[in-house]
């Protein structure tokens, strides 16, 4: 749970003096920082000649929820309004003796300051000058190396397993690691040094420093529930903490005064894909004869869900609900891996050795060791146990048949359900509260081994079950 509260405490005069002196030395006159879970609007109010205008009144209005905040420009004409939910705002600037300025469609993004500099013209206060569009396209206010992945990008671009955090690869300096598991490297740093947050709280699969889910469970949070996220690659502020790599900082959607939502369905089927000739396993082409051949493993994925949000009490209480279902059908091949050794391993030995061959060759009678791979394995059994060659052949053949009975195609599926509800309460102009929950259930019989072909028996693939529950509550008090 994260809170922004102002507490009233009683301190001694001496302690207050020391504390005040420390704060005076530490706090800069003009700070551009905002928290990791919201954004801000700031700028300088000037007249037409470029002179600053102090004591101007600035009102920011959330277009979606009608929430408003008010500030005044300081002696240098500067203002900053913090703790703004990402979204679209209208900024109105008023000053005595100047025409009113109204900036429409100012975009606030998570973790960034949107610069809205106001240039007021002298005129009647009844006059209004309207400007459309302002967004933090270029960061000129902080040393952070950060980019924001917006909702349009999340909706338009596909990624493996529908995992929203994979879109961080669109940020310069972010690359996939070489092992193919989807881990991210920021600026070439280790993939184990990152942090992923959702609405200000950690959402890490801690061992690998990635969004929960890894390679088996597809994802732990619904992509359609994420409004946008910020990718901090370097020089980020101390509020993010504990990470030497990168920070993937996301915020989820919330309701507004307008009902909105969507329904989606994604279908991915290996039948539509080209064949990968590097994926091979042994195939019996005649009795006792095996060859390594390429095969096209079945890989079927279905993803579907919905989102809906809107008002419960207009301007006061809002809801958002998302549900998602993911199904994966990917049967595995239990086999002895390799190429030429497979044909030898599966082949049948000779029922009897040739006249000039013996398991224990002797120069006295002119015998030599057998050259056939399977006959050599039977002779090793003869030499170790003292069995006759024919008895050893029987045991060897029985063992191979028992092994083959444990190999073959193993049914393997994965199913995942996620439910994400959220409530937002605009208590008054100075207080806003929100609470959200995430419930994920993943069930995958035989799903531990994920490769198309593995050197395990069909009963040894291992079952995979994941349960993920979390609740985040937040109270902002200004």
Image (cartoon, grey):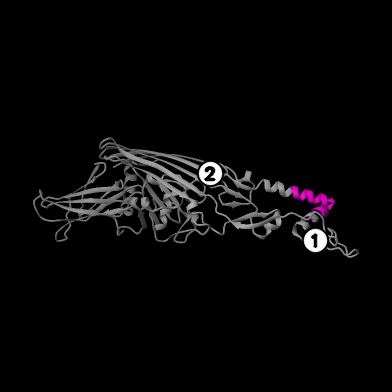
Asked which secondary structure carries label 2, the reply is strand
Residue for point 71% across, 48% down: 401
Mark 1 sits on what residue? 370
From mark 1 to mark 2, how far is it between C-alphas? 46 Å
Q: Position of residue 151 (x, y in %)?
A: 34, 50
Is residue 274 rendered magenta in the image?
no
Mark 1 vs mark 2, foreground winner is 1
10 Å neighbourhood of mark 1: few (<14), some, or many (≥20)? some
Question: Residue at the location (8% across, 51% down)?
Answer: 124
In the rendered structure, which segment of residues is drawn in magenta?
380-398
Is residue 284 found left or right of 18 in the rendered image?
A: right
Image quadrant occupied by the N terminus: top left
Residue for badge 2? 413
Q: Quadrant of residue 138?
A: bottom left
Q: In front here: 111 or 454?
A: 454
Can residue 95 be seen here? yes
Of marks 1 and 2, which one's residue comes earlier in the chain? 1
In the figure, is residue 351 to the left or right of 365? Answer: left
**In this orientation, does residue 29 appear?**
no
Farthest residue, direction front: 286
Find the residue positioned furthest to the right. 364
Indicate whether residue 386 is drawn in magenta: yes
Residue 159 percent coordinates (x, y) = 43, 53
Residue 260: quadrant of the picture: top left
Residue that appears at 50% across and 45% down: 328
Our reading of the magenta stretch's main secondary structure is helix
Please name whichever residue, 447 or 279, is drawn nearer the observer in this view of the structure: 279
Q: Position of residue 60 (x, y in %)?
A: 23, 47
> Residue 420 location in percent, x, y?
40, 39
Viewport quadrant of the C terminus: top left
């Amino acid at each position: 749970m994260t809170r922004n509260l102002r507490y009233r405490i009683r301190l001694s005069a001496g302690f207050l003096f020391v504390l005040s002196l420390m704060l005076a030395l530490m706090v800069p006159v003009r700070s551009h920082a905002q928290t990791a879970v919201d954004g801000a609007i700031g700028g300088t109010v000037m007249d037409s000649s470029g002179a600053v205008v102090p004591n101007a009144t600035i009102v920011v209005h959330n277009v979606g929820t009608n929430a408003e905040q008010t500030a005044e420009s300081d002696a240098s004409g500067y203002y900053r309004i913090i703790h703004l939910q990402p979204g679209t705002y209208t900024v109105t600037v008023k000053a005595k003796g100047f025409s009113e300025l109204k900036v429409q469609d100012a975009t606030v993004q998570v973790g960034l300051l949107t610069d809205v500099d106001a240039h007021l013209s002298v005129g009647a206060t009844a006059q209004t000058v309207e400007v459309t569009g302002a967004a933090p396209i270029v960061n000129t206010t902080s040393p952070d190396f950060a980019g924001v992945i917006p909702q349009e990008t999340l909706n338009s671009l596909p990624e493996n397993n529908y995992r929203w955090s994979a879109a961080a690869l669109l940020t310069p300096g972010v690359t996939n690691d070489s092992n193919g598991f989807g881990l991210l490297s920021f600026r070439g740093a280790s993939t184990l040094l990152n942090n992923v947050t959702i609405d200000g709280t950690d959402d890490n699969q801690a061992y690998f420093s990635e969004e929960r889910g890894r390679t088996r469970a597809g994802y732990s949070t619904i992509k359609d529930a994420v409004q946008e996220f910020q990718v901090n690659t370097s020089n980020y502020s101390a509020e993010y903490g504990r990470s030497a790599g990168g920070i993937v900082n996301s915020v989820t959607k919330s309701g507004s005064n307008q009902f909105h939502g969507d329904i989606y369905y994604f279908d991915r089927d290996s039948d539509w894909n080209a064949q990968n000739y590097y994926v091979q396993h042994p195939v019996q082409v005649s009795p006792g004869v095996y060859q390594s051949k390429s095969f096209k493993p079945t890989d079927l994925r279905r993803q579907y869900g919905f989102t809906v949000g809107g008002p419960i009490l207009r301007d006061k209480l809002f809801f958002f609900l998302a549900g998602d279902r993911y199904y994966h059908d990917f049967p595995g091949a239990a086999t002895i891996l390799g190429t030429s050794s497979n044909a030898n391993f599966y082949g049948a030995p000779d029922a009897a050795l040739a006249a000039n061959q013996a398991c224990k060759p002797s120069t006295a009678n002119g015998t030599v060791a057998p050259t056939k791979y399977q006959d050599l394995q039977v002779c090793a059994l003869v030499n170790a146990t003292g069995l006759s060659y024919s008895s050893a052949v029987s045991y060897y053949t029985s063992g191979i048949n028992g092994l083959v009975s444990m190999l073959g195609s193993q049914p393997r599926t994965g199913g995942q359900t996620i439910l994400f509800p959220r409530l937002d309460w605009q208590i008054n102009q100075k207080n806003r509260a929100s609470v959200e929950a995430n419930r994920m259930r993943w069930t995958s019989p035989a799903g531990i081994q994920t490769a198309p072909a593995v050197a395990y028996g069909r009963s040894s693939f291992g079952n995979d079950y994941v349960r993920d529950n979390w609740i985040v509550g937040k109270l902002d008090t200004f």
